[in-house]
């Protein structure tokens, strides 16, 4: 009888641990943006990525924005070649950083874009050259959570074999002011990220001349501060 009770107690503890783990995992994934659509287009010029997310700001992120703290969202994409005889080879790595800030004087949301050719080059020294303003946060987030016609690889960088693109979108905590970085990695409200892998079509398709939908350039005296 005693052994049965001990066995029951052990099973109960295991069940509680698993239940807590599941709850914690659910919280961590609660802010994963929904992928509305995603596709790759292979042309004679290279490979273009198209993704649209249903991106929503969490209460903590929105509150920080309103208080004047800019948020940085990063798109990253890697083209990888499958190799059965060795580790898979990374052919190309690109990234795009978007800076979203609230302007209290105009009550508008300002989005700035910085493009890095190599995702491994690091984030310091980002230069924002493309800017756009929006009347609402939802309008700005709709642009943040979308890439269309993003050329992630040139034809000259593509080798023969099975290729795939692995892309990732996330709120980049490393670019936030240092007080915001402390302990944020485990906070669900700040854990905004989603990723996916897509196989590159084996055959090139006719180029539809789809332009990259970056925000329209705007003259900004003195640049972005």
Image (tube, grey):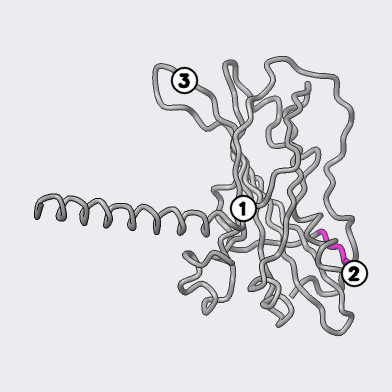
Say what secondary structure mark 2 lies in. Answer: loop
Q: What is the distance, in whole Å, between disc 2 and disc 1 at their CAs?
A: 25 Å
Give the class, few, some or many, for how many residues have Cα within 10 Å of label 3's Cα (few <14, many ≥20).
few
Most common SS among magenta residues: strand
Q: Nearer the viewer, residue 141 or 88?
A: 141
Residue under circle 3?
83
Say what secondary structure mark 1 lies in. Answer: loop
Q: Give x and y (percent) for residue 124.
A: 58, 63
Say what secondary structure mark 3 lies in. Answer: loop
Give the mark toward the camera: 2 or 3.
Answer: 2
Along the polypeptide, which appears first: circle 2 or circle 3? Answer: 3
| In the image, residue 115 lies in the stretch drawn in magenta | no
Q: Residue at x 40, y 17 (%)?
A: 85
Residue 135: numbered disc: 2
Looking at the rendering, in which quadrant would you find the C terminus?
bottom right
Q: Give x and y (percent) for residue 97.
A: 68, 56
Along the polypeptide, which appears first: circle 2 or circle 1? Answer: 1
Magenta residues (range): 130-134
Q: Is residue 119 above or below residue 201?
A: below
Q: Residue at x 21, y 54 (%)?
A: 10
State left or right for residue 69 relative to residue 44: left
Residue under circle 1?
32
Q: Residue at x 66, y 67 (%)?
A: 58
Along the polypeptide, which appears first: circle 3 or circle 1? Answer: 1
Quadrant of residue 20 in the image? bottom left
Q: What is the distance, in whole Å, between disc 2 and disc 3 at their CAs?
A: 48 Å
């Amino acid at each position: 009888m005693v052994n049965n009770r001990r066995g029951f107690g052990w099973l109960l503890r295991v069940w509680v641990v698993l239940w807590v783990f599941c709850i914690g995992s659910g919280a961590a994934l609660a802010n994963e943006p929904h992928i509305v659509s995603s596709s790759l287009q292979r042309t004679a010029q290279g490979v273009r990525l198209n993704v649209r997310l249903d991106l929503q700001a969490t209460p903590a992120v929105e509150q920080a924005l309103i208080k004047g703290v800019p948020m940085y969202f990063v798109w990253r994409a890697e083209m990888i070649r499958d190799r059965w005889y060795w580790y898979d080879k990374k052919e190309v790595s690109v990234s795009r950083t978007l800076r979203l800030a609230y302007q209290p004087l105009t009550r508008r949301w300002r989005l700035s874009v910085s493009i890095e050719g190599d995702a491994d080059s690091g984030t310091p020294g980002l230069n924002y050259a493309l800017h756009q303003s929006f009347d609402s946060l939802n309008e700005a987030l709709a642009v943040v959570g979308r890439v269309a016609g993003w050329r992630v690889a040139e034809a000259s960088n593509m080798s023969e074999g099975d290729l795939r693109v692995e892309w990732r979108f996330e709120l980049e905590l490393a670019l936030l002011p240092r007080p915001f970085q402390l302990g944020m990695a485990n906070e669900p409200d700040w854990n905004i990220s989603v990723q996916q892998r897509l196989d590159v079509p084996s055959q090139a398709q006719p180029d539809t001349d789809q332009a990259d939908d970056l925000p329209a350039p705007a003259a900004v005296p003195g640049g972005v501060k």
